[in-house]
Every structure is written in structure tokens, then in C-alpha cells.
Image: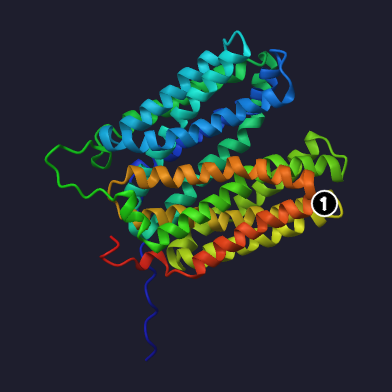
Amino acid sequence: MPAAPEARPERVKLPFEVWALVAGGFAVALGYGVVAPAIPQFALEFGVNAFAASAIVSAFALMRIVGAPVGGWVVGRLGERRTYTIGILIVAASTGAAAFALDYAQLIVLRGLGGVGSAMFTVSATALLVKVSPPDARGRVASLNAAGFLLGNLLGPVFGGLVAAFGLRAPFIFYFFTLVVAAIIVAVALRNSPFAAVRAAGDADDTLSLAAALRIPQYRSLLLSVFAFGWVAFGVRISVIPIFVAIAFQGDAAQAAWVLSAYAAGNALLIFPSGRWTDTVGRRPLLITGMSILAVAYFAFPASPGMWAAMAIMFVAGAGSALVNPGQQAVLADVLAQRPGGNVVAAYSMVSDLGGVLGPLVAGAVVDLAGFGWAFALSAGLLVVAMIAWAAVPDSRRLGPAAR
């Protein structure tokens, strides 16, 4: 008599906190997608040059790096929900005020304050997500969160065209309201959540310190990985690829947008399956495969003979990114194992932002000195180093009691 087929494992039900955080993240991404293109253009209205206009973006990113340790400290004192709400409201207040900035100095100061609030939001949101993620669905939660941000970023420019018709100050007002909506969603939905409760003074201290996390090989590989990923996905992709399109293909901003959209399409194709595979196959295989695909794509991109080839390569790169993104957050959740660890999350966020800031600066300098080929080869080399780091450690799902 043939053996009965094995029953498929039950699909893990996700806590309501996950859906609240994904909804909040979507609202933030939607508003940012509307305001991001308007920020440098608004700065130019004050009569500054292109470098000063782009510095508005850099000021926000740099203050996110500075604000990440602050966010970790505040999470440890006030809890994730309060830190999330305070951080979002800081960004909302600074963004709303920026809409009424009277000069360039006011605008750059307000965007810098927004960067601190953004760091607090990011650290607390990530800490909450990894805390509420069921051990068998950490990859799925990460892919849901990434999909929420991806959808918001895709819809943002659509709304942005409509909002910008009311002037360059209007996108800031729109972003202000989406941030307030995100703050309300999380503050209300998580007000009675045991995961978001502030720890009492007499509770046992099981917080994972940064020093302890750094002794875990998977966490060290994770920091290297998010630095390389931030370098290519948040840095070089946004800054150097549009320049390449303009110089190599004499393309305009619309053509550069098509190349970046191809990346988003590849990402969207695999973001949900990647979360499932991360939970079933493991973090390590997905991270190694995704890093390999990204490395090959970035190495090949400057050899693109035309726009269609460039879009195809970026589509593949987006698919590789989708394999990496959920795995990285799942590893962070494995390391924390639902323990508090604001400084551990802050370091994770800060290193990712550092890659996003340094990537455009270094790659841009390499382009000027040696050309696009070397700039993209450097980026691909960083991804290869990260891939080797993942190959050298066991899968984080196998972290033993000593690490937990």
C-alpha cells in the first residue's frame, strides 16, 4: 500500500501588528514618492546651484546616519511604538514647515531634522517588525514590508504629477498628511499590543547588546551585506545609472526613469516568492544567489549596447534584489530572536544608510577618474565580498542557544 502523501505545513497566520506596520510603511513610501522629485527642484527656487540643491538630499541621508544611534537609544527608553510615533511626527512637522521655508538655509535645516526623525522611525519600525515576525514566517513578513514600500514608491510619482500641478510646495503638504496617517495607524493599532508595550523597570533584562550581536558571525556578515546592498541599491542605482543613461545613450530623465522602472518590475516579480523561499529554503541560499545575480548585473551594465539591453539587465538586477532584501531582515530577526535590541537594529540601519551615502560619492569619483566600467566593477566587487561572507557562515535559522 503506498504511503500517504505528507501534509503540507500550515500557513502561519501573521499578527495584526505586521499588517499595521506594512500599512504605515506604504503611507510613508507613497508620500515620499510624491515629494522626492520636488525636493531639489524646490531648492533651485531659492537661486542656488545644482550642488547646493542636491545637498538637500545628502543632508537628509547624513542626518539619518547620525540619528540612527539616537533612535536605538530612544527605543530602549520609550519602546518601539512611541519612538515610531515621535519619529514620524518629527518628519511630518519638519516636512510641513519646509513647505513654507523662506530661504535655502531654512530648507536644509528642516530636511536635516527630518532625517533624524526618519532614523527614529526606521529603527523602531524595523525593531517592531522583527519582534512580531513569527519564526517560521520572517521572510514572508520582510517581503510584505518590502512590497508595501515598493507599491508606495511606484504610486508616488503617479500622484506626484497631479500634486505638483498645485506648485512645488504642494508635495510637501501631501507628504505631511501621509506621515500623519502612518503615525495614526501605528499609534492606534498597536496601542494595546504586548509586543509594543514599554518594558517595566523590574522586568528581566534580556536586551541583546550591540557587543553581543557583533560576536555572532551571521550579524557581522549582515552588516557587510547591508552596506554593499545600500551602496548599489540605494546609492549607485539612483545616482550613477541616470548619469550613464544620459552620457552613453544621450537619454533624458524619462529614459532613465524607464531603466529604473525595469529594476522595480524585476523586484516586484520575485518579492513575494522570495519571502516564502527565505522561510522554506533558508536565508543563506537566497542571499548568496541574490548577491551573485546583482554582482553579474552591475558588472555587465556599463557594457549595455542600448536602452533595451540596459533595461533587461536592470530587470535582472531587480530580481536579484528581491532575493536579497527579505533574507537580510530575516537574518536580523533570527539574531534578535524577538528580544529587544534597539542598538542592534540602529547599527543595521546606519550601515545600510552609510552605503547609500558613500556609493554615489565614491562611484561618481571613479567615473570621473576611470570611467563607468570601473565604477560598476567596484560595486560588483562589493557584492561579491558580501556573497563570500554569507558563504562562510551557517544559515541563521540554525543559530544555537548560545547565540540566542
Instruction: Look at mark 1 in the image and give the residue it sits on.
Output: 308
Q: Pinpoint residue 398: horizontal percent, then vertical percent.
A: 35, 68
Front residue (pair 48, 335): 48
Residue 2 vs residue 46: left or right?
left
Callout 1 amino acid: Trp
Q: Residue at x 28, y 60 (%)?
A: 404
Q: Pinpoint residue 211: horizontal percent, then vertical percent.
A: 33, 52
Residue 187, above or below 270: above
The answer to whether residue 307 is visible is yes
Residue reaching furthest to the bottom: 1
Q: Residue at x 72, y 53 (%)?
A: 376
Q: Pinpoint residue 21: horizontal percent, then vertical percent.
A: 40, 38
> Which image quarter: residue 298?
bottom right
Kind of element beneath mark 1: helix
The mark tally for this picture is: 1
Q: Quadrant of the N terminus?
A: bottom left
Q: Residue at x 35, y 38 (%)?
A: 72
Residue 135 vs residue 297: left or right?
left
Front residue (pair 300, 274): 300
Q: Residue at x 37, y 26 (%)?
A: 86
Front residue (pair 140, 77): 77
Q: Pinpoint residue 28: horizontal percent, then vertical percent.
A: 50, 31
The answer to whether residue 34 is visible is no
Residue reaching furthest to the front: 369
User: Callout 1: few (<14), some (14-19), or many (20+) C-alpha neighbours within 10 Å?
Assistant: few
